[in-house]
């Protein structure tokens, strides 16, 4: 028989511990349940739409879903929001970008969760830099600064056989900073593209 945890108590405990997302291990510890009991409990709560499964072993309360940029950082760690989404966020490009684009030193991945697409592209460890921590609704997330997002976007466009970004606010890009980030990727063609586009 699975030990039942009252939904009100469950919700109150999650909020008390300030867990915008929580894992099977978190619930095991909080409610002193076995692994199998925890998995069954979360499966039941998810089927009742009381909790939302973000990925295997990671959940959030359905009535307290955290901001999407916080989710982006939690779905696949380590990562930071970059490329076109970050450029739109910093108002460097005029378009609204719906896919939340991130980079990671791990393998390329893609998730579709809660009506959003979260994509992650692999970048070399030496180039996993150039981000700051910002907040949405009090929750921190990593996001590239304008220059790093610009370099990352052009780097992956080059890899995908696409033309460099054409429409962007040049005033918001520091060429020296952008070229520093470009050098970390060690791609001569990219260096040439960044130099040319920022002239």
Image: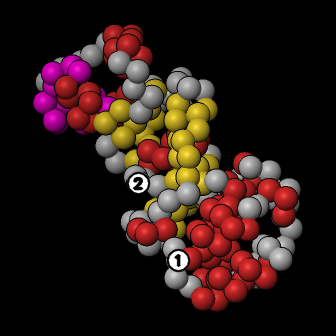
Q: Is 168 situated left or right of 121 in this image?
A: right
From the image, which quarter does the N terminus lie in?
top left
Disc 1 target residue: 185
Q: Earlier in the sequence, mark 2 or mark 1?
A: 2
Closer to the camera in the image, 166 or 1: 166
Q: Quadrant of residue 165?
A: bottom right
From the image, which quarter does the C terminus lie in?
bottom right
Q: Secondary structure at mark 2?
A: loop
Rounded to the nearest angstrom, the CA distance separating label 2 from label 1 is 18 Å
Residue 32 in the magenta stretch? The answer is yes
Closer to the camera in the image, 67 or 144: 144
Q: Secondary structure at mark 1?
A: loop
Disc 2 target residue: 78
Q: Is residue 116 above or below residue 160?
A: above
Position of residue 142 measured from the top left corner of the image (x, y, whole percent):
53, 46
Closer to the camera in the image, 118 or 81: 81
């Amino acid at each position: 028989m699975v030990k039942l945890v009252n939904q009100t108590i469950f919700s109150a405990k999650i909020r008390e511990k300030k867990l915008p997302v929580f894992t099977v291990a978190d619930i095991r510890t909080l409610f002193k349940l076995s692994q199998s009991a925890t998995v069954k409990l979360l499966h039941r709560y998810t089927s009742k739409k009381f909790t939302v499964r973000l990925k295997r072993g990671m959940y959030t309360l359905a009535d307290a879903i955290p901001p999407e940029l916080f989710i982006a950082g939690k779905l696949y760690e380590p990562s930071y929001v970059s490329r076109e989404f970050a450029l739109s966020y910093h108002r460097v490009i005029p378009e609204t970008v719906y896919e939340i684009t991130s980079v990671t030193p791990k393998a390329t991945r893609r998730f579709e969760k809660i009506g959003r697409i979260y994509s992650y592209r692999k970048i070399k460890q030496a180039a996993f830099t150039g981000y700051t921590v910002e907040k949405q609704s009090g929750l921190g997330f990593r996001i590239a600064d304008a220059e790093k997002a610009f370099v990352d976007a052009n780097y992956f466009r080059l890899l995908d056989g696409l033309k460099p970004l054409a429409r962007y606010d040049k005033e918001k890009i520091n060429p020296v900073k952008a070229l520093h980030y470009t050098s970390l990727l060690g791609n001569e063609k990219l260096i040439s593209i960044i130099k040319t586009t920022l002239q």
